[in-house]
Amino acid sequence: MTRLFNNPAAFADEALEGFVAAHRRLVRRVSGGVVRATAPAPGQVAVVVGGGSGHYPAFSGLVGQGLAHGAAVGNVFASPSAQQVRQVARAAQTGGGVLLAFGNYAGDVLHFGQAAERLTAEGIPCATLAVTDDVSSAAAGESEKRRGVAGDLAVFKTAAAAAEAGLPLAEVVRLAKLANARTRSFGIAFSGCTLPGADDPLFTVPDGRMAVGLGIHGEPGLAERPVPSADEAAELLVSTLLGELPDGVGSPRGQRAGVILNGLGSVKYEELFVVYRRVARLLAEAGVETVDPEVGELVTSFDMAGVSLTLFWLTDELEPLWTAPADAAAYRKGTVAPGAAAEPSAAASADTELAEDAAVPEDFAVPQSSEPSRAAARTVLAALGAIETTIRAHAEELGRIDAVAGDGDHGIGMRRGSEAAHAAGRRALERGAGAGTLLHHAADAWADRAGGTSGALWGVILRALGTALGDTERPDAPTVSLGVDAAADGVMRLGKAETGDKTMVDALVPFADALSDAVGGGAPLAAAWDTAATAADAAATATAELLPRLGRARPHAEKSLGTPDAGAVSLALIVRAVHGALAGNGAVGTTPDTASEPASEPTADTTARKG
């Protein structure tokens, strides 16, 4: 288990702070992550990688000469926000464009994609690449659905070496895509990992058994088998990967391959070497020549006891990129000439200056607002305070629900997001913001601090409500209902989810529909919201009987039967907490931290039990 931590919600930030303090020769801190401490050549393509914390040395440990130019670092097992990715990319780029590379997870695809759009709009050429090497996460015919695991290293290394050689963005992207298409990984595990502050691991494996085909976020394996000997483990890993060769590799005989035998956290180096002894022999017997094999911890999952094997099938143009020198905190190869210390531009320094909440600066101007809207803003702040209190109380249980078939990070992410939104809302109100502006600032703060899919979606929800409420009028029930409808539409558009997919949408749409019906029937807002919150609670409970069709839980669909969706449960908890503020329980105009929660509020425990 993870034993050394302070506040679990601050673990990722504190770990990154300590990493930078230990490696100042190689990296420097910017808002959102780290960039090289040495200066790349002007006009060189910047390769910016990233993902959630908990996988060291991925992703910060791979920043350095010959490897990544920067890494955007998210919360534990959660993607960095689009704002974080943009800030790191702006600090890393030197005029040659940016390649954003990341594992193929919904939150990463969403946030890195949004960042690429913003960078392109700002005049910085940008491309994205999602790594899809894990053969256990989707069938060969659906490789675009596969997740990125230890094969990240092969793709990142290829792209970075191509950039270091001075190739233009289009060529760097082409070679990175080629590397991704020729990389395959497969893993096994003997125990799950435990997140900071959690008492139990995300999944367990019975004594004497191993999980086959696990994910690096603690996603359970797809099957179980008896614990093998080291040689038997090697045989399973090699035979699985030789059973699916990339296009263009007709037979393993005569091929050259980069090899990565990766420890996932608590399998030690000596054990890995025992396994690799057999891996090397099996590959040689199959006629494969190994090139610069890597054995060690390269993409981990906290304390997970597991190991994965990656085969990177080389070509004449890929091999020199795989073997090129590199100097990063956790990955060194060959000899790299010492680089000059970077001199960040004034624009980059201003854009990436560290702050408690980079999405909402401490000093900002707010649009003019009316007194009725400012009064509504006080109610909104009370609601944000009630949300924070509710999420803090249920964060651990939300994580437990999420861990049944996912990665268990939902509670931590929601806590970070709700805390940031409440703080940003308070700052906005202090500067005279109306309801719309306050919600817009809260939306940006939630998305930026939480990261992950849920962070982006709650940013969409709060922003849609803020746009509907505006800064001039005191909102009435029809206006709020229209804002909720817009929020539901925005979530479905951005997240690509529909009702029945076992996501937040399965509670959000019934909530929006029930609110619209009640308001249309003439009910005042508090009463209509109460009715809609009850509908959301029932809908969240009903997700226990659904099979997930999207996200990390999809490969483990059967495991989630009987357990509701964590995103749907958290939405039901939140809308019930908001009802307290609307009904007067959240004492409009008083300090929200002291607002009482409504007695009828459901708990994550009881919602889960209903499922």
Image (spheres, rainbow, N blue to C red):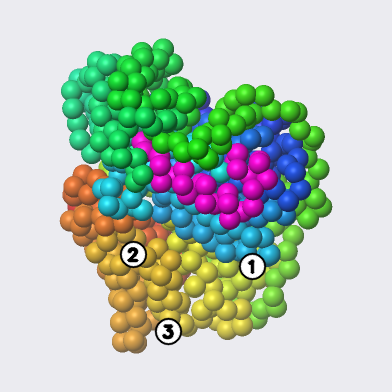
Residue that appears at 38% across and 32% down: 255
Tell me where residue 59 appears, x and y as whole percent: 54, 38
State whether the magenta stretch is mostly helix, strand or loop: helix
Structural crowding at the residue carrying mark 1, measured as other residues with C-alpha within 10 Å and reported as few (<14), some (14–19) or many (≥20): few
SS assignment at label 2: loop
User: Could you say which disc has been placed on residue 121 in the image?
Assistant: 1
Quadrant of the rendered image containing residue 38: top right
Q: Examine the rendered structure and indicate whether residue 284 appears above or below residue 343.
A: above
Please state which amino acid type lies under the numbered disc 3: Pro
Q: Earlier in the sequence, mark 3 or mark 2?
A: 3
User: Could you say which disc has been placed on residue 217 in the image?
Assistant: none
Residue occupied by mark 2: 497
Instruction: Name the residue nearer the viewer: 500 or 159.
Output: 159
Q: Earlier in the sequence, mark 2 or mark 1?
A: 1
Structural crowding at the residue carrying mark 3, measured as other residues with C-alpha within 10 Å and reported as few (<14), some (14–19) or many (≥20): some
Instruction: Name the residue nearer the viewer: 224 or 131.
Output: 131
Whether tag 3 and tag 2 are in contact, CB under 8 A, the answer is: no
Instruction: Name the residue nearer the viewer: 49 or 409.
Output: 49
Task: Note whether residue 234 is visible.
Answer: no
Residue occupied by mark 3: 478
Residue farthest front in this picture: 254
Q: CA distance from mark 2 to mark 1?
A: 27 Å
Quadrant of the rendered image containing residue 228: top left
Q: Examine the rendered structure and indicate whether residue 403 appears above or below residue 470.
A: above
